Image: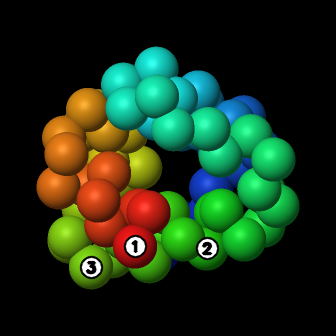
Amino acid sequence: MTQEIGIIDTKKIISLINEYHDYDFSNYSLTTFKRRILKVANQLNYASLSDFISKLDNKVIFTKIID
C-alpha cells in the first residue's frame, strides 16, 4: 500500500485501536504513527487503507502495530 494516510484517517485508526484493544495512541506524533501504520500495512500486503482499517480488530495486526 503506497497511499498516503490523511489526518482524519489517522485519527480514525487511533480511535478504533483504542476502542478494540484499549490502547491509546492519541499522544503519539501523528507523523510517526502514520509511518508505523504504513509499515504494518505494507508488511501485511494490504492493497488499500480501507482494507487495513476494516481489520483493526484483529490481534495480529494490533500486535504488529505495537511492536
| Residue 63 place in picture, x, y as percent | 29, 59
**Residue under the point 65% across and 46% down:** 25
Kind of residue indicated by mark 1: Asp
| Horizontal arrangement in the rendering, residue 29 relative to residue 4 (left or right) | right
Residue 15 vertical placement versus 50 (above, below) = above
User: In terms of depth relative to the viewer, which is nearer, 59 or 54?
Assistant: 59
| Residue 28 place in picture, x, y as percent | 77, 56
Q: Residues within 10 Å of mark 1 (few under 14, many from 20)?
A: few
Q: Which residue is mark 2?
A: 35
Kind of residue indicated by mark 3: Gln
Residue 29 visible somewhere in the drawing: yes
Q: Which residue is mark 3?
A: 43
| Horizontal arrangement in the rendering, residue 35 relative to residue 59 (left or right) | right
User: In terms of depth relative to the viewer, which is nearer, 17 or 12?
Assistant: 17
Q: Residue 54's image quarter?
A: top left
**Residue under the point 31% across and 67% down:** 64
For the residues labelled 2 and 1, say whether their Cβ atoms are less than 8 Å apart. no
Question: Which quadrant holds the N terminus?
Answer: bottom left
Q: Which residue is mark 1?
A: 67
